[in-house]
Amino acid sequence: MSTGFTAKQVRAIRERDGNVCAWTGVESDRLVPQHRANRGMGGSRKANRLSNGLLLDSLINGQIEADAGMAAEARRRGIKISLHADPRLVPVLYPDGLFYWLLDDGTRIPVGEDVKF
C-alpha cells in the first residue's frame, strides 16, 4: 500500500509551485514531491494533503536530512515542520522572498492576504 502523494496530487503540487524547487526556484529533473511534516511511523495517509507537500530538489532534501544547519533553515522556511503541526497554519518561504499559506485545495496565498483555513 502506497503512502505517498497520488499522481493527481503531484500534478497539483507541480502546478501550484510552477514546477520549480521550493528552496531554489530552479526547475530540475531531480524535483520530487516532499512531505513538509513527515508521515511518521507506518506512513499515515493523513500526511498526503496538498498543504503538506512541495517540490524539492532531491539533493537539497538529502542535505536537509544530513545537515543540522540545513534542517534548521528548512524549519525556518516552513519547508519542514513538526509532525503534529497543521501544515495549513505554517507558511512557507518561497524563492521569491514571500511567505505563502499552502491550502488543501492546491492554492497558495501570500501571507497578509485574507485566507480561510
Image: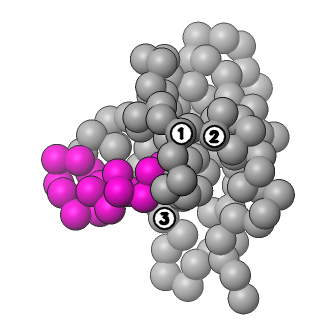
Residue 82 visible in image? no
Is residue 32 placed above or below 16 in the rendered structure? Answer: below
Sooner in the amino-acid sequence: mark 1 or mark 2: 2
Sooner in the amino-acid sequence: mark 1 or mark 3: 1
**Residue 106 point in image, percent of width and height:** 77, 40
Mark 1 or 3, closer to the camera: 1
Local SS, label 3: loop
Residue shown at 72%/88% (left/top)? 1
Residue receiving disc 1: 27
Q: CA distance from mark 1 to mark 3?
A: 24 Å
| Disc assigned to residue 19 | 2
Q: CA distance from mark 1 to mark 2?
A: 6 Å
Residue type beneath disc 1: Glu
Q: Which residues are magenta?
A: 56-71
Residue shown at 83%/57% (left/top)? 8
Left or right of residue 4: residue 24: left
Decide whether the magenta segment is chiefly helix, strand or loop. helix
Tag 1–tag 2 contact (CB < 8 Å): yes
Closest to the observer: 106 or 23?
A: 23
Left or right of residue 4: residue 56: left
Q: Residues within 10 Å of mark 1 (few under 14, many from 20)?
A: some
